Amino acid sequence: MHTQWEAVIGLEIHTQLATQSKIFSGAATAYGAEPNTQACAVDLGLPGVLPVLNQEAVRMAVTFGLAIDAEIAPQSVFARKNYFYPDLPKGYQISQYELPIVGKGHLDIEVDGQSKRIGVTRAHLEEDAGKSLHEDFHGLSGIDLNRAGTPLLEIVSDPDLRSAKEAVAYMRKLHELVRYLEICDGNMQEGSFRCDANVSVRPKGQAEYGTRVEIKNINSFKFVEKAINHEIERHIDVLESGGKIVQETRLYDANKDETRSMRSKEEANDYRYFPDPDLLPVVVTEELKQQILATLPELPEAKKQRFAAQYGLDAETAATLTSSRELADYYENLVKLSGCEAKLCGNWVCGDLLGALNKAGLEISQCPVQSERLAGLLKRIADNTISGKIGKQVFDKLWNSTLSADEIIEQEGLVQITDTAAIEAIIDAIIAANPGQVEQYRAGKDKVFGFFVGQAMKQTQGKANPDEVNKILRAKLSN
Amino acid sequence: MSLTATDVKKIAYLARLGIAEQDIEHYAQDLSGILDLMTQMGQLDTQGVQPMSHPLDQTQRLRPDQVTETDQRGNFQLIAPQTEAGLYLVPKVIE
């Protein structure tokens, strides 16, 4: 008999906070600068320097805590995590250990239509390390310390996740949230949002956890899912063949779709944390908490519910439209500016607009068709100046130019022909030219009707009002 | 509590300190003495006393989020043993 296995997963997510300067120094955090041009004496760990905490990093951490309904520590403490690596010049990372700034909170995810509450154990502030480049520098490693000292909020989940799918849903939810809160740009290519996963497997029904393995630095949603699934499979294989899982850190190799051992955790884990004597306890007053609470934006879940209710959208459309704050704002602007039916706007945004953005690999913030211009197009569809089909042509032109919809419709002569006499004349000519098809239709071959519609649309370059064409054709053919 | 020679070697390794073999016994005694003092302090009744994380009874001052540092790479790299293409070069480390 096959044992039923259950996976237990917890995620540690490092979000880079979107501050201008570093967490403990006045050096810039901008991405992509020349190596070491944004690494000051504090970031380099030169003797005699002292860290001074960035108030914006504190505000952002508290903002996050309040958004997940977490306890905010009235006093939190920075600690030194000691280890030696060349991209960490001080020999310790300033982090938080026993008293993190954000305590227990939670986040609700949805998987296969089921809602599930995932606990957040804690979130703490810490500094990022620099980058090591192992390309050939004559057998040496190159160190770039621009990233050293960049503020991170490490968000640790409870081991509440039971599948790779749940883990991805949680990660996406968190990604959406930090961008809504504008505390992190969420750019995964640039490493602003990174994930480590703790994975273990146990027989279903067993209360104790199995031995866990940490998978490091999995930097896309796709890889998180693959890496976790791969690791679960590996655990089950080992356990079913009578083996034992070793507690260790593993790296996911996307090219081979496998994880491999990085280092044994027991030795590396001896970080000898202690309170950093260079930093005093951080106090978050009730007053500051209230101030930050008052500035919290409408959160994704609330916005989704409101969109469904206010605009009469189905759950999926509402979820898509509220997947980022920018997209939600775009949509609401479009509804307001076009004065069109909310559903029509929703279909255009979720269909043509997102399709075009995806194809071009662009974010909504980089969209070449601003909501004003799309509103101009939707107005003309709503007032029957053009058909929905011609609308798609106009949209392509909007995308590739800076003209307004009205200018494009005018220039291209796309105004819909609603003049019944004009359409009748065209249809008369088609009927006269195709006596064979007319006979077939009258003999009961209904399919031929489509042929006539096609001809009419072709001869009017799609500009004839389709409803009119249908009506006139039916009338004339049945004579 | 008393530390063994193995403990001392491990602590020295974690801190990347080079210690001479003949000094190990001496370190073990000294460090054990410190730990004994801790044990003695641990016997005090500290119920209701808030743990102290810093000897100064003050709270952290915060700094406005402004970029105040300019690029000093040229100066900093004057004291570096080896640099190339703006990078600090170090003996190769691969995990």
Image (cartoon, rainbow, N blue to C red):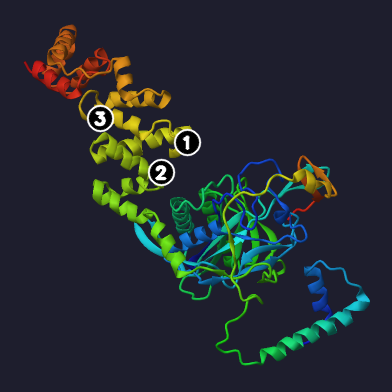
Residue A396 place in picture, x, y as percent:
38, 25
Chain of the residue displaying label 3: A
Which is more toward the observer, A457 or A195? A195
Q: Which mark is residue A326?
A: 2
User: Looking at the image, is A202 positioned above or below residue A193?
Assistant: below
**Residue occupying image coordinates x 19% and y 21%:** A465
Query: Does B51 sit left or right of A441 as displayed?
Result: right
Which is more toward the observer, A151 or A161? A151
Chain of the residue displaying label 1: A
- C-alpha distance separating marks 2 and 1: 13 Å
10 Å crowding of disc 1: few (<14), some (14-19), many (20+): few
**Residue occupying image coordinates x 69% and y 40%:** A34
Q: Which mark is residue A362?
A: 1
Q: For the residue marked with disc 3, what is the amino acid?
A: Lys
Q: Would residue B61 be seen by someone viewing this image from the given angle?
A: yes
Q: For the residue marked with disc 2, what is the amino acid?
A: Glu
Question: Which residue, given by chain and number where applicable, does mark 3 sit on?
Answer: A379
Circle nearer the viewer, 1 or 3: 3
Marks 3/2 in contact by CB < 8 Å: the verdict is no
Chain of the residue displaying label 2: A
Which is more toward the observer, B86 or A448? B86
Which is more toward the observer, A203 or A403? A403
Please tell me whether mark 2 sits on a helix, a strand or a loop. Answer: helix
Query: Does A27 sit left or right of B84 as displayed?
Result: left
Quadrant in which the C terminus of chain A is drawn: top left
User: Which of the two labelled residues, at mark 3 and mark 2, occupies the earlier sequence position?
Assistant: 2
